[in-house]
Image: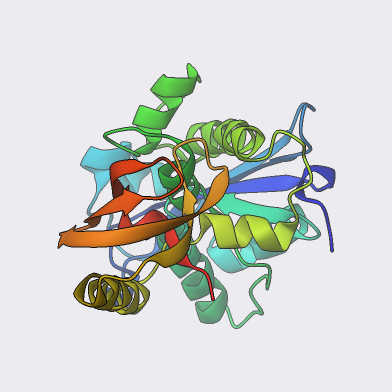
């Protein structure tokens, strides 16, 4: 198993014509910031001709005029692949960037990089007790200078710094494996939350304790037994036998044991 802190993180960010690749939106800018923990990273970015009008200029400030004469994605794909090769890719709200990454490689008739992308959005929700986990909010929390927001290189650089800060909080001993990091960053899907909620409801109905692993705001999981009292939306009220008192737990931070 590979230790994450021995690897290079490659933060990737896309700016796009719009928000919906399934509706024909395309990438217009992509950037990668890559490097090891504590080192100065390597940066790479490019504008792209999407072959269609830009509908989201009000978000990133990139206009059709700025993209005239820029390369198509297929021309820049080899350089992008080299920047990602052998790294641990990371992005904030990785589902968005991954969807455009896969789309552009598919349209170019090329194999996309296979390494899954670490999601700093999911990681932040586990590590930080913030009211908002937007990129801007997390950068403000860590006092990270973001540069020009919603431009690929500045956002990728902010994400790279933020990722190492979050991982350092989550794993002060730097013994986290790449595989465990992915499990930590992954947000539970709707079906997983539904199944977990049903199990907690059944525990409440039977009035029997249930053993859980709970990941608090400092991302250090603790094993504890709880007796569920009631479910309140995304939270559960329960008596915590570890603390000897009633507590409120976030369901998306709970893992059942056994």
Q: In x, y percent, where is residue 176?
A: 73, 50
Which quadrant of the figure contains the N terminus? bottom right
| Nearest the eye: 108 or 144 | 144
Where in the figure is residue 24, as x and y percent of width and height? 30, 73
Residue 58 picture location, percent across and down:
21, 39
Q: Residue at x 64, y 63 (%)?
A: 75
Residue under the point 46% across and 58% down:
97
**Camera sees residue 138:** yes
The quadrant holding residue 149 is: top left
Give the residue drawn at x 68%, y 68%: 115
Q: Is residue 153 left or right of residue 53?
A: right
Camera-nearest residue between 150 and 77: 150
Q: Quadrant of the C terminus?
A: bottom right
User: Is residue 219 shown left or right of residue 209?
Assistant: right
The residue at the point 47 percent across, 65 percent down is 211
Is 250 or 99 nearer to us in this picture? 250
As displayed, is residue 251 above or below residue 68? below
Query: Does 209 appear above or below 111?
Result: above
The image quadrant that residue 100 belongs to is bottom left
- Residue 250, x across and y down, in percent: 31, 52
Residue 193, by quadrant, is: bottom left
Numbered circles on residues, count: 0
């Amino acid at each position: 198993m590979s230790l994450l802190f021995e690897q290079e993180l490659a933060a990737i960010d896309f700016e796009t014509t719009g928000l919906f690749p399934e509706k024909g939106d395309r990438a217009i800018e992509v950037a990668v910031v890559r490097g090891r923990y504590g080192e100065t990273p390597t940066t790479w970015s490019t504008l792209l001709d999407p072959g269609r009008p830009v509908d989201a200029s009000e978000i990133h400030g990139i206009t059709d005029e700025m993209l005239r004469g820029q390369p198509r994605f297929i021309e820049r794909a080899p350089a992008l692949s080299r920047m990602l090769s052998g790294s641990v890719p990371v992005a904030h709200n990785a589902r968005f960037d991954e969807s455009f990454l896969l789309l552009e490689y598919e349209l170019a008739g090329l194999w996309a990089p296979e390494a899954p992308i670490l999601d700093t959005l999911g990681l932040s929700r586990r590590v930080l007790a913030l009211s908002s986990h937007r990129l801007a909010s997390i950068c403000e929390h860590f006092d990270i200078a973001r540069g020009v927001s919603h431009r690929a290189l500045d956002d990728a650089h902010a994400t790279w710094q933020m990722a190492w800060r979050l991982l350092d909080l989550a794993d002060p001993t730097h013994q986290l494996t790449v595989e465990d990091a992915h499990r930590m960053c992954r947000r539970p899907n709707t079906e997983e939350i539904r199944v977990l909620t049903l199990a907690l409801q059944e525990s409440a109905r039977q009035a029997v304790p249930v053993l859980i692993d709970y990941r608090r705001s400092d991302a250090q999981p603790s094993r504890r037994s709880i007796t569920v009292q009631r479910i309140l939306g995304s939270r559960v009220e329960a008596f915590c036998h570890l603390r000897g008192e009633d507590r409120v737990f976030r369901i998306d931070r709970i893992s059942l044991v056994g």
